[in-house]
Amino acid sequence: MWAGGERVPALPGTAERRTLSRELLLVLALSLGASGVAAVIRFVGALTRPGGLADQAATLNGSRAPGRPWLDLVWQVFAISTALVPVLLVAHLLLREPGPGAPGMRAIGFDLRRPRFDLAWGAVVAAGIGGSGILLYLGAHAAGANLTVVPESLPEVWWKFPVLIASALQNSILEEVIIVGYLLRRLDQLGWSAPAALLTSSLLRGSYHLYQGIGGFIGNVAMGVIFVWLYRRWGRVMPLVVAHALIDIVAFIGYALLAGHVDWLPTA
């Protein structure tokens, strides 16, 4: 069996399969699975709050210590760093796979072996998905099916843009390593069919974006389907990490520069 361009070790025993299932559930419970549950709760809260969804805001990068820029910076760095711990856990688990020569993160194509390929295709994917994503968000917001997404509300300090870029990189690494590379590899090892694995990964991606509204959910499910298909084709998550990072960087910095200066961009 193959996943991510590397041969997936066979797991013939029931005990091994149970261990792998528990491992997968624990990784998700410590990361994006828990984020999905939190997003559903937040969405229910938004639905039951007086007023429409479009009248409410979902802030992605906000101040963590208002009026105290140095403490705020420390909190921002801490939050970004600790959010990546599940990625380190996945790297550890992949290195401990049974059999000789466990490939580690190379098993899912998270490495620097093909930088030109990763950067070029990542940019192409970002251009296609980013443009259509903006149109979907604007349409869903106009229809009242989405909250007003505020990509950033950081203070005007020297570290604002570096933190936004770091946040975008953290999002892209965490999501693509866990929800595409690691999840699909483990589901393949557990004998799931390719369509079932694709549906699971895509719906999970949509679930932890549900706090943004229906548009955020649908758009990210569609993105998940495309990303899983590309991962199966390329056997690498690196182009997807690049694409996701570019999409978020443009969204975060673009909002910081354009909010309040153009009529078409919704603001809180």
Image: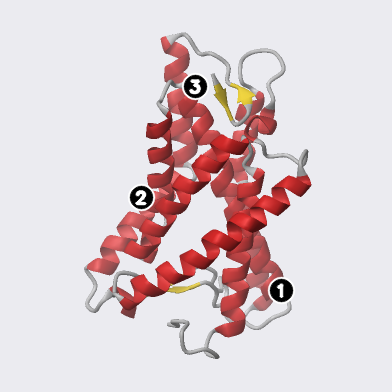
Please, what is the three-letter code of the amino acid marked with disc 2?
Answer: Val
Residue at position x 52%, y 59% from top? 129
Alpha carbons under labels 2 and 3: distance apart: 25 Å
Alpha carbons under labels 1 and 2: distance apart: 31 Å
Please, what is the three-letter code of the amino acid marked with disc 1?
Answer: Trp
Which is more toward the observer, 20 or 193? 193
Which is more toward the observer, 2 or 38? 2
**Mark 1: secondary structure:** loop
Residue at position x 63%, y 57% from top? 124
Q: Residue 159 got which mark?
A: 1
Question: From this viewpoint, is residue 79 visible?
Answer: no
| Lateral position of residue 231 relative to residue 95, left or right | left
Q: Position of residue 181 (x, y in %)?
A: 56, 37
Q: Are marks 2 and 3 in contact (CB under 8 Å)?
A: no
Q: Position of residue 54 (x, y in %)?
A: 33, 77
| Lateral position of residue 243 relative to residue 134, left or right | right
Question: From this viewpoint, is residue 72 visible?
Answer: yes
Alpha carbons under labels 3 and 1: distance apart: 43 Å
**Mark 3: secondary structure:** helix
**Mark 2: secondary structure:** helix
Residue at position x 63%, y 50% from top? 241
Residue assigned mark 2: 37
Please, what is the three-letter code of the amino acid marked with disc 3?
Answer: Gln
Quadrant placement of the N terminus: top right
Q: Earlier in the sequence, mark 3 or mark 1?
A: 1
